[in-house]
Image (cartoon, rainbow, N blue to C red):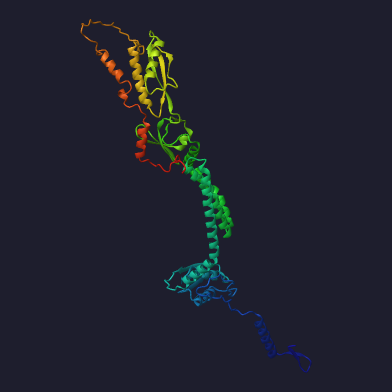
Amino acid sequence: MNQATNGSGAKCFNPARTRGMHVLALLLVLAVLPNPRPAAAQLPLPAEDSVIEEPTSEIAVNPAARDAQISGRLQRILTASGWFTPARVSVREGIVFLDGQTETTERRAWAEQLAGRTEDVVAVVNRIVVERPVSWNLAPTWREVQRLADQAKWLAPLALASLAIIALFWFAARGVAQITRRTLRRRLTSALLADLAARAIAFPVILLGIYLVLQVAGLTRLAVTVLGGTGLIGIVIGLAFRDIAENMLASVLLSVRNPFRTGDWIRIGEHQGLVQNLNLRTTILLTLDGNHVQIPNSIVFKSIITNFSSNPNRRADFGVGIGYPDSIVAAQDVIMAALRAHPAVLADPEPAVIVDELGASTVNLSVQFWFDGRAYSIFRVRSSLMRQVKRALQAAGVSMPDAAREIIFPEGVPFRRMAGDEQLPGGPALSDTAAQHDDAVTMSGGEGNLTSEQGPLARQAQAAVLPEAGENLLAPVR
C-alpha cells in the first residue's frame, strides 16, 4: 500500500506517506499506554477530635519509583495533614525516615502506617516526637461528662433494682438471725456462741442477695465466680491462719461442751487457777500467785481438764511413817481420832487410814480424808491435819523414825561421859507447856484461816484488768 506504479507498470516508494502512517501508530500507542505519573489514592484526613484509623489503601507510585518520588509524595501528604511541624521525609534505598513533631501518639502511628503502605517501601524508621501541648479546650472533658451522664441514666434503673434486692435480703438476713438467736437461747448457755451461730446462718442469705444482684446486672460469670471464690477464699484463709482457726473452733466446742464455768477452780496440764474468761483465742486463769495465765483454746481442748469446783467435796491425803515395833492398829486409832476432831473433815464420806507400804525402816500409812472444797483450802487443811496427827502420835508414844542409814566409822566411835545437868546439843525436849500450847492451836496454828482461796481470788479477779479478754463465751444468754 505504500508503493505506487509508474507508467511502465513498475512500483515506486512514497516517503511522505510512510511518515504519516508512523505518526498515527505512535499516537495510538500513547493512547493505550497508562499515564507514567498516575494520581495517588487520596487518604481522607480525619477531623481534630475524631478517631484516627489506619490507611485503607496503598499509596500508588510508579512501579519503578525512585526514592525521590516516594519522599516527595509522602512529604506532600504529611504537610497537607497539618499534624506534623515540621514534617521531614527522607528515603534511601526504599527505607523511609520520618522526622518531626506531633501532638498525639495516634497521629505518629498514622504517619508510620501511611509510609508503610506506600508502594515500593521496604521499611519505615519513625523518628517523629510526640509533644503534647497545654490545651485549655474543655470540649473533650465536657463530652466525657456527657458520656458518663448518659451511662448513669442507663444504669439508674439497674442501680435502684440492685439496691432494692440488697435491702430486701439484708432485712431477711436480720430476721433469720433474730429467729436463730431466739431458738438457740433455750439450748445454748453462751451469748457469743448463739450470736456466732446466728450470723453463720444469716450469711448465706446475704450471699444469695449478692448473687441475684450480679445476675440482674448481667454479670453471670462474676456471680458464679463469687460463689466459687467464697469457698476458695475459705480454704486459703483456713490454711494461712490454721492456728487461729483451730483456736476459734476449739473455743466454740468448749462453749458447747461446757467443761467449766467462770469462777471454777480447774487444772489444765500444769496450770491451775480460777477461770476468768474464755474468748475466741484463749482461756484465762487467775493462779494462786495472782497471775493471769492465757492458754490457747486448742491446747485446752486437747488437754486433760480437772475441775475441782464441779463437785464441792474433795478428797486429799498425806503419808505418815511409824516404827516397826509400834502397833499399827493403835496408830490408826490415834490418827482417826485426830481426823474426826477436825472441823474441816467430813464425816461422810468418812476418813480412812490405810497401810500403804512396808518401807526399809518404817511402816508407811496413807491418811485420806474428805472436805468441802468450796469452803476450805486444801493446802491449809492438809497442813493443819499433818500438824495435829504428828502431835497425837507423839502424845501416844508412837515413834516416827527417820529413814534407815548406814554410817561407817573406820576409826571407831568416841564416847564422852556427860555431866548431870548437861543437855544434848539438839536442845531441850518438848515440854508439857509446849504440848498444851500446840493443842490449843490445833485448828488454826500457822495456817491461819482454813477457808478456801476462791473467795479472795474472785474479789481480786473482779478488780483486775484482763489482758486480751474479748467477749466471754461463758457469759450466759440474756
Residue at 41%, 15% in the rendered image: 365
Does 208 sit above or below residue 72?
A: above
Residue at point 50% right, 40% down? Answer: 188
Most distant residue in the bottom direction: 7
Tell me where residue 354 appears, x and y as whole percent: 43, 16
Residue 443 in percent (x, y) is at 33, 22
Q: Residue 471 at x, y = what percent? A: 43, 43
Image quadrant containing the N terminus: bottom right
Residue 85 versus residue 23 in the image, above or below: above
Q: Can I make out residue 92 in this image? A: no
Nearer to me, 304 or 276 = 276
When asked about the image quadrant of residue 473, the answer is top left
Asked whether residue 373 is in view, the answer is yes
Above or below 186: residue 332: above
| Quarter location, residue 455 | top left
Relative placement, left or right, of 330 versus 230 is left
Q: Is residue 436 left or right of residue 354?
A: left
In the rendered image, residue 295, in percent from the top left (x then y), is placed at: 42, 36
Q: Determine the residue located farthest toward the right in the rendered image.
A: 9
Q: Nearer the viewer, residue 5 or 263?
A: 263
**Observer-nearest of 415 and 295:** 295
Which is nearer the eye, 472 or 340? 340
Q: How many marks?
A: 0
